[in-house]
Amino acid sequence: MPLFFIQSLAILQKDLKIEWRTRERLGAMAFFAFLVVLIFNFAFEPASPIVKTAAPGIFWIATVFAGLLGLSRSFAIEKQNDCLMGLRLTPADPGAIFLGKMLGNAIAMLILAALILPVLVVFLNVEIAPALPRLILPILFGTLGFAAVGTLFSAMSLNTRLREALLPMLTLPMLVPALLAAIESFRAVLAGHPLSKIADWLVLGGAFVALFVAACLLLFECVLED
Amino acid sequence: MDGLGLNTLHSPLMITSAIVIRNLTHRFGHFAALQDIDLVVPKGQTFALFGPNGAGKTTLLRLIAALTRPSSGEIWVCGDNARRDPKMIRKNIGFISHHTMLYDDLTARENLAFYGCMYGLQNLDARVEEVLGAVGLTDRQRDRVRDFSRGMKQRLAIARSILHQPSILLLDEPFTGLDTAAQSMLSNLLIALKAEERTVFLVTHDFAKGLALADRFGILLRGQLIREASTKEVDESELRTQINSRL
Amino acid sequence: MHRRPYILPFVFGMLALIGLAIAPYLVFVYAGIEKEMGLAQKIFYYHVSSAFAMYIGFSLCFVFSIRYLWKRDKRCDLWAACSAEVGLLFCSLVLLTGPIWAKPVWGAWWVWDAQLTLTLVLWLIFVAYFMLRTHIEDPVQNARFRAVLGIVGFLNVPFIHYATKLWRTHHPEVVRGEEIGLPPDMKTAFFFCVLTFFMLFFALLFKRVSVEKARDELESLKAEMRA
């Protein structure tokens, strides 16, 4: 395996290990997402049909906002003891650092999504089980797109004043196409449409991930530099 | 510039020097942190850089480590240009600062293995074992860094910096905040590195330690290198008065 | 040497001024009144011209951002930031004129049509660009981060465009007048407006750049004085 991927995997492994030992990030994210779903319930009348139409939106809003919470922590662990400088001192390609960090965030988001789905079933009374296999692609593209954009901007907002506010302001507008694709394909799948019906959205979601990962791999050097 | 033969990598100056700095100026916005620095550190020598806070010492170290791009001027480290080949430079440089650059929730061994992987080292396990032994942390290698004392963290930070056997070691105020055991370990390490013909570039407040360890020294004041000489030519009190008179 | 840049804003400013004086005549007198939309359609000339000027601004920002990351020349960053700024101004104009058009024609201030949604998202991205500008202290890092944002923001345009389009086709939507061929008198007025807005765009851009250069010079003189 080329050194580039070995280094990415080393970063991923290190992040997962730290997350597993501290369990800070995912716990806070999951709890926050749970709260978002719950609060959304109060916005609608109980058992109204609107809740079901809104379910895809609620799912992604919970995932994205909880994800933003986790993202701001993603580079915070590198900031402790100035580990980020330690990383920059190594000859590792900044793209490899980006890829490792991004994969770590994507895995956290996927776990989060897997935790939110049952909450949706229980509290919003949405039937998800029959659509589950077809939900995999939309969720995968959505979380990967989010992780790519979010990782780039969380590294950028690290040294700014107003870090917590700046991250969503940078990430959310940039994420609009990926979010639209994710929400719309989620909705179509829940309504029982086959994947072929949402091919347009899937292509858009996949292309978004491909372009942003490529752009970030190239541009991350400029973000890490000092 | 041409007269110095800097354009060819094989010029005598490039071959015998670890660090060559020419006309280096670095600005933050409009503030010149470093101005017209010219400095050559020969291979195998220990160089001590003194100067008050805010003189630009840390900035100079970061420029040498290719962490920052210079505004103008050139830096070569072991013949590699900092602008063009920062990756090559990073392979040759070890860096110790007052930050440990260690992950608190990884064990000592995991920290070193992670960094070793980022440096692309071969025979990683053996090398990790070796440096752990060198800093006396073999017994504690499976404990998390979070539970270490400050001195142990510093020792592990030293291990991290020499893991990839750098030919140049950069040290930013390495003695501040160290306990006596770590201090003497660091001094011994520097002496050992010297015996191995490795170059050491040391930034410090501590005149006594700096002069004792270094072959040559420099004084940086408000971004300018106002003096550069052999340590044999001065003593501590003279340096102190010189800096105080210029402040 | 330092005087020369002042010629450009002057020339383009004059051209824009003349254009802006003639444009109302072409728009309100020369061009006929559109049958279905009536007078409200007049805003179209300014609305679409602003949109074109916005795109020039953001594309210039994209080009200069790439050039900045490549060459690390402070001037490229200055041009990128000024292009983004003037682009954002025209972007705001599009968003302001949109509702004026939409209310009488479709009965709602805001219609979520693809083009307008795209403009709104671009507006948000470039507002974030200026947020970044105010909240990072180190000027070099500031320039680098903004360049990255300018590049990915612009690369995102086709995605946002495609997404909003798909989104709207999934939900039936009103057809906009501009997609139907324009009669010749309206076409003339329209092209004239577009040209005038180009002039205005470049006049503002050049002026903005010369102001920024002067500011930069002042700052370096101040720094010299202090040293």
Image (cartoon, grey):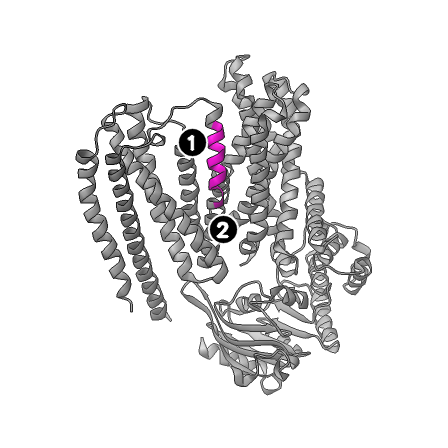
Q: Which residue is mark 2?
A: C148
Residue C52 location in percent, x, y?
Answer: 35, 42
What is the spatial separation of the Cα atoms under label 2 and label 1, in whole angstroms?
Answer: 26 Å
Residue B28 figure quarter: bottom left
Inspect the magenta stretch and tell me whether residue C157 lies in it: yes
Residue C14 lies, with reference to residue C165, above or below; the image says below
Q: From the viewer's perspective, is C26 left or right of A208?
A: left
Q: From the viewer's perspective, is C129 left or right of B204?
A: left
Q: Nearer the viewer, mark 2 or mark 1?
A: 1
Residue depicted at x 53% and y 59%: A226
Residue C212 figure quarter: bottom left
Q: Which residue is mark 1?
A: C114
Q: Is residue B199 visible?
A: yes
Residue C48 location in percent, x, y?
Answer: 32, 37
Quadrant where the image shows the N terminus of chain C: bottom left
Residue C172 location in percent, x, y?
Answer: 44, 22
Q: Amino acid at mark 2?
A: Val
Decide: few, some or many residues near mark 1? Use Cα within 10 Å; few <14, some 14-19, many ≥20.
many
**Mark 2 vs mark 1: which is more N-terminal?**
1
Q: Amino acid at mark 1?
A: Ala
